Structure formats: C-alpha cells, structure tokens
Image (spheres, rainbow, N blue to C red):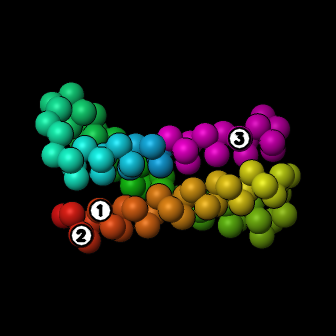
Amino acid sequence: MSKLVLEFFRLGLTFLIFLFIITLLFMEINQVQSSWFAKISQTFSLPVFILSFIIPVWMIIDLVRKKVIDKSIFNLTFFISTISILLLFFAIVFIK
C-alpha cells in the first residue's frame, strides 16, 4: 500500500467517523426513535470513540517522521478529525 493510498484511507475513515457522529447527534437532538440505529450506534460507539483519538495521534507521528505525501489531504483529515473530537466533547458535556 503506497503512502498516498494510506492517506486517502485515513481521510475516508475520518470522514466516516464524522458522518457517524453527525448522524448520531442529529438523531439525539431531534429525538428520532429508531431501534436499528440505536443498536448500530451502541455497537460502533466505542470503536468510533477510540479511532477519533488514535487517527490524529497517528497523523502527528507521520508528520514528525516526515512521511506525509500530500499536505492538503493531511490538513483536511486533521481538520475533520478535530471537528469530530469537538463534536464528541459537545455530545458528552451538553447532551449526556
């Protein structure tokens, strides 16, 4: 797997995490009752929570080791992961 494919994989994974968090917040704020989504969100919440913190650390390690091929993909991934972490903190603190 080339480094560019790895960066696109990291971007895609970060975007999927972002969509999951946005959908979860939308369902919670609008009080939408969906049993299948509740089961899926209970299953994926812990892996999403762990991945949302591991991906930025992984990115910082790659930046220090100078293994970043495309800075624009790196910046976009880092921006999306930062927003995802902030949304997670919003959900934990304000929505409970």
Q: Amino acid at mark 3?
A: Phe
Q: Is residue 93 left or right of residue 22?
A: left
How busy is the neighbourhood of tag 3: few (under 14 within 10 Å), some, or many (20 plus)? some
Residue shown at 70% from the left, 65% from the top: 61
Q: Is residue 12 magenta?
A: yes
| Rendered image: mark on residue 8 | 3
The residue under label 1 is: 91
Q: Is residue 10 above or below residue 57?
A: above
Q: Is residue 6 above or below residue 90?
A: above
| Rendered image: mark on residue 54 | none
Residue 82, image quadrant? bottom right
How busy is the neighbourhood of tag 2: few (under 14 within 10 Å), some, or many (20 plus)? few
> Which quadrant of the rendered structure holds the C terminus?
bottom left
Magenta region, mostly helix, strand or loop?
Answer: helix
Q: Which residues are magenta?
A: 1-16
Tell me whether circle 2 and circle 1 mark residues in contact (CB < 8 Å).
Answer: yes
The residue under label 2 is: 94
- Which of the two labelled residues, at mark 3 and mark 1, occupies the earlier sequence position? 3
> Judging from the image, what secondary structure is the residue with disc 3 in?
helix
Whether residue 47 is visible: no
Q: Is residue 93 above or below residue 26?
A: below
Q: Amino acid at mark 1?
A: Ala
How busy is the neighbourhood of tag 1: few (under 14 within 10 Å), some, or many (20 plus)? some
Q: Amino acid at mark 2?
A: Phe
